[in-house]
Amino acid sequence: MVPPEWYLLLAAGVFCIGLFGVLTRRDALYFLMSVELMMNAANINFVAFALYYGDLTGQVFALFVIALAAAEVAIGIGIILVLYRNFGDTDVTVPTEMRW
Amino acid sequence: MILEAFIAFTFVAALVVMVAPDEWAGKLAFGLSLAPFLGSLYLWSQFDAVGNALTGGTIAFESRIEWLEVGGRSISWFVGLDGISLPLVVLTTFLVPLAIVSAWTPIDTRQSQFYGLLLFMEANLLGVFAALDFFLWFIFWEAVLVPMYFLIGVWGGPRRKYAAIKFFVYTNAASLLMFIGFMSLTFALGDSVSSFGLPEITQAIAAGGLGTWFGFEAGTIAMAAFLAMFLGFAVKVPIVPVHTWLPDAHVEAPTPVSVLLAGVLLKMGTYALLRFNFTMLPDQASALAIPIAAIAVISVIYGAMLALAQKDLKRIVAYSSVSSMGYVILGLVVFTEYGVGGATFQMVAHGLISGLMFMAVGVMYNATHTRMVGDMSGMADRMPVTVGILVAGAFGYMGLPLMAGFAGEFFIFVGAFGAPSLPYAPIFTALAMFGIVVVAGYLLAAMQKTLFGPFRLETDYEVGRAPLHDVAPLAVLLAAIIVLGVAPDIFFEMIRDAAGPVVEGVSVDV
Amino acid sequence: MVDAFAYVPAIVLLPFFSFVVALAAGRYLPKGGAFGGIAATAGSSLLSLWVLATVAGGEAYNETIYTWASAGGIGPTDIELTFGLLIDPLSALMLVIVTLVALLVHVFSLGYMNDEGETGLPRYYAGLGLFTASMLGFVVADNLLMAFMFFELVGLCSYLLIGFHFREEGPPSAAKKAFLVTRFGDYFFLVGVVAVLATFGTAQFAGDGSFPALADQALSGAGDVAWVPGGLELGTWFTIIGLLVLGGVVGKSAQFPLHTWLPDAMEGPTPVSALIHAATMVAAGVYLVARMFGFYALTPTTLAVIAFVGGFTALFAATMGVVKDELKQVLAYSTISQYGYMMLALGAGSYVAATFHLMTHAFFKALLFLGAGAVIIAMHHNENMWDMGGLKERMPVTYWTFLAGSLALAGIFPFAGFWSKDEILYEAFVHGLNDPLLLGGWVMGLLAVPVTAFYTFRMVFLTFHGEPRSELARDPEPVRWNVKGPLTVLGSLAVVAGLVNMVPVQKLLGIDGIDFLTQWLNNDFGGIDGVSYSAYNDLLATYGGYAPAELLGLSEELTLLVAAGLSLGLAVVGVLVAWRLYNVASPTEHTAKLGGIKDVLYNNYYLDELQVWTAYRTEDAAGGADTFDQGIIDGVVNGTSSVALAAGSRVRRIQTGLVTHYAAMLTLGLLALLVALGVSGGWFL
């Protein structure tokens, strides 16, 4: 059996890629994709620990997260559409109305 | 149960007025507010308390219902009256109908909300004076601020928002300090009390129940609690140097709100000082007698000097309230029957007189749309009755004998002059008494400039006599002031009875 | 027999009712409520006479009638604050004087106010009624607190009446000054009242438990007082109390340096001036000292101060009277001066002489003011004496009565003022030989005599003699019965009132029983023990060593003659100088010869300027306090909120609105948390 450290390292790597995307990209669509990556990193962890402990709860949670991700994409795309309609762009640095 | 009915009725009246149409909200509010007044007269007639409610005297109309239990201490609905609170209850219910009538002319928008808030405030004020459980009392105490905030912030003058926020934040921060002080006291009491009832706590402290808490000695905690509560209440009174919210609030508040602010709200501070600081912690109070007396004297003289410098009639009266409250503090700190009793009497007397002054200034403002001393002269020519009453009220403020103000001040002076518990008492008293000269100076100067001389006011409208409903409350107040001045015993007897045990809390070698 | 004392409250209440009636219904009554006032004061006068007769029958009255308040004092017993009545020879006499003068002033007002078409008459009569009631309440007061209360009410009434013509600039200002200056004196009085209550636990004037009696017992070691402030000697403390109460007296009786309100008070209607000067407000101060003389007799230092202040005021005010141009101004300064004499008498321990002069002065000063009022009516309210002249022929009644009053004021034999003033100077002299302060008072009092006579007759000659100096004076407006009647009554009294106490004649000729007033005040007819001339003399002898001095080896008769001759001679000199200078067809202003001194005198020694300067400096200080308050104290409050706001506006810049930044912050926060946990958990070790 592959030791859990490897899964964790993989998940951490995927998470960092997602995080890097969120922090450096300005386009909302990239955001969405990066967030997907981060969630999948979490999923990998869930599944890995489920395997390690022999407990199915982690896999159930992974399924939940996948469903949640689908809903999140729907909402995220909706937000991006509204963003595009109002600002003519999907650049997240343009709408700063929410500051102080 | 009568006190519950009394307070509840006022709350219901507030709700009813709140939803009434604007057109007759004022008259409805007046009618409804007469009921608490008559009720308070009934309470007065049935009053049978002996001694001080906190130190173990009998409590009139006592009612106690267990409510919650927190950390081994019960919180109850606990109300009742004694000789100190009853006069203040009567004062409140007496002033509110008059304030409502005085609002008929100046308040011309959102009347129903205005009168509803006034009545809501009255209900909470009654609660403050009747409550004998700390938490209950604190809820009422804080709840008074809310209507006041809106009354100033919505119906006030040009800088109303500034004044309302200043008032609210200042007094609320002070309440926090006071709350912390009181709580530390209850924690230090430990197991010696099982409730937040003020009588239990007072008696437990008197019995030496204060223990060590959090590594601090009982004496340290008591002193810290005293200082925290003193500072907290000092803002409300207000005492120099935490007084600056008062003139702003008064200047911006509409007339009826000023009347209640000066007439009753300031008395909450002195009432609480008497109840908490001076009744519960008399030893700390007398240990700090010299600084407190010094602050009192400074309040008197400094407040009067500030009043002398003002050009706005309302500011003059506001600062003179600071001055008058200084007398009350002096009366409290000396721990004699005349001193403490006189201070309580002065609360009532000043409530009536400052109410009268604000109302009279308001009536003149209705006619002239100005309160500035330099803007008008010879008002006596156009508004003889109003001015006549204003002059009488001003002399009342100066402490003219046979008016209520003199009685209160004189009792305080007699009590303070030879007070054994205050070192240098004669000097402090004599200094404070000089206030009666300064107060005469600024009031006479302001009156000479605005009321007398040839009539002059640069306006394009006629200035005529005030309507009857503006003048009537003034006349009623003046009559009350004179009655109290000629026969102070109608209140002073019961006040003295309740003040006596407070005085005995201090042991002094005569 | 019905008890007269049961009606004493009515004496006070009748004028009070006239106040209420005039205020409430004056505008619907004929003459603006004047008849109510006349009826009330007439009723009070009759009742007062009845009380006087009862007192003469050997009865006295000293009862508490109402407890105002009561609470624990310093000692074991409660301090009771009460109202009560004290009717003894002194107060009974004063009641008659006050009610009589008040009645005459009311009648005179019909001519001065109603006939002149004044407006606001109900207010005027209401003020007169309250004024009279307050003064009567003060006179019958049986304790110091009650006396203080009515003393203050008297001050209020003077404010209302001096400022009667409130639509003009001057009167409200004068009213303010009168109240404020007397208030300044009353401050000390109030401290004194409080001190008396704290020290003795009572403020009663008379009786065994009264504070003078307690003070006497304490000083003689027979008793003790409730409280004395930290380590003070009893005598010292009593002296301080005496001086404190004296503050109120100096204010109300217009003694130096608080006399400045009185000349300004001439802005009030003339009948009011008469009332203020003769019988009510100004008299209240001297009456108060006489009332509690049993206490003052214990403190010789206070007495010496009283005498010196009195003597100084007598001379000081008289010099200012010399240069004034307006009729009422001269009379105002003469009032200050005459009250100075009364104070001198009290300070010299001569209770009788002071009361005597208070009485004669009440009559002749009321007369002079009403006479001046008549002249003012005639002159259409022009008060400048240089516009008058020659009114003698045109107003004979006024002239002769005025002359009688002037002779009394100047102290010419045998008019009322001679007897009382002579007695004062004699007493001050014989007692003064033991005490330099007292002697100084006597010297100044004596020097004031010729000055008084001079300005009085300067006034008479300028007003009534010579040629008319203006159109108004050539054709004066006639006055009616309501003016002449009071003048005649008072004129007669000014002539004969001195005959009630002819002490010098008694001593010189050995005719017994013509020192009626002395017997009266000595309780020879009856009174209250301890409140009498002889009782006071005993106290004075015990505590102050006030015995008649050796008189420089002269016999008593000779001293008496010399003293009387000296004061009369000086008065005559004053009159003659005035005669020489002003009793000519068209007199000139000789005062110009005084040069710079005249300016100083005319400007009242610049004392008014000093007080105005003080007032302005106080205002400056108030302005400074206000700046301090708004700037520093409120600045701290606003500063606190500014700091909070500024800090908030700095911190909120973190909220850029950029999602990326928020995400970065989340990450950084997470990292920081991890590192912190790691360090504390020891991962990196």
Image: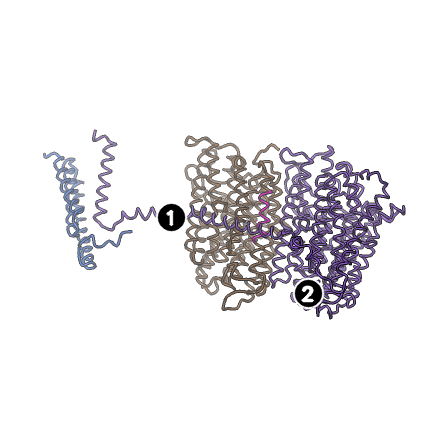
Chain colours: A blue, B brown, C purple
Instruction: Say what secondary structure mark 2 lies in.
Output: loop
Is C603 on the left-hand or right-hand side of B125? right
Q: Give the labeled residue for mark 1.
A: C642
Residue type for callout 2: Asn
Q: What x and y, as percent, mark residue B323? A: 54, 48
Residue B401 visible to the viewer? no
Magenta region, mostly helix, strand or loop? helix
Is B23 on the left-hand or right-hand side of C223? left
- Above or below C647: residue B468: below
Instruction: Say what secondary structure mark 1 lies in.
Output: helix
| Residue C50 sits in quarter | bottom right
- Above or below C219: residue C560: below
Is B311 on the left-hand or right-hand side of A61? right
Relative to the observer, which residue lies in front, C459 or B364?
A: C459
Q: Which of the chains bears the disc numbered 2?
A: C
Residue at x 22%, y 37% (from the top left corner): C674
Q: Nearer the viewer, mark 2 or mark 1?
A: 2
Q: CA distance from mark 2 to mark 1?
A: 64 Å
Task: Report the disc number at residue C382.
Answer: 2
Q: Which residues are magenta?
A: B430-442
Relative to the observer, which residue lies in front, C296 or B224?
A: C296
Query: Which residue is situated farthest in the top direction here?
Result: C685
- Above or below C184: residue C473: below
Residue type for callout 1: Ser
How many marks are shown on the rendered structure?
2
Q: What x and y, as percent, mark residue B256? A: 50, 57
Is A85 on the left-hand or right-hand side of C509? left
Q: What x and y, as percent, mark residue B3? A: 52, 49
Relative to the observer, which residue lies in front, C511 or B367?
A: C511
Q: Earlier in the sequence, mark 2 or mark 1?
A: 2
Please say whether residue B434 is one of the residues in the magenta stretch: yes
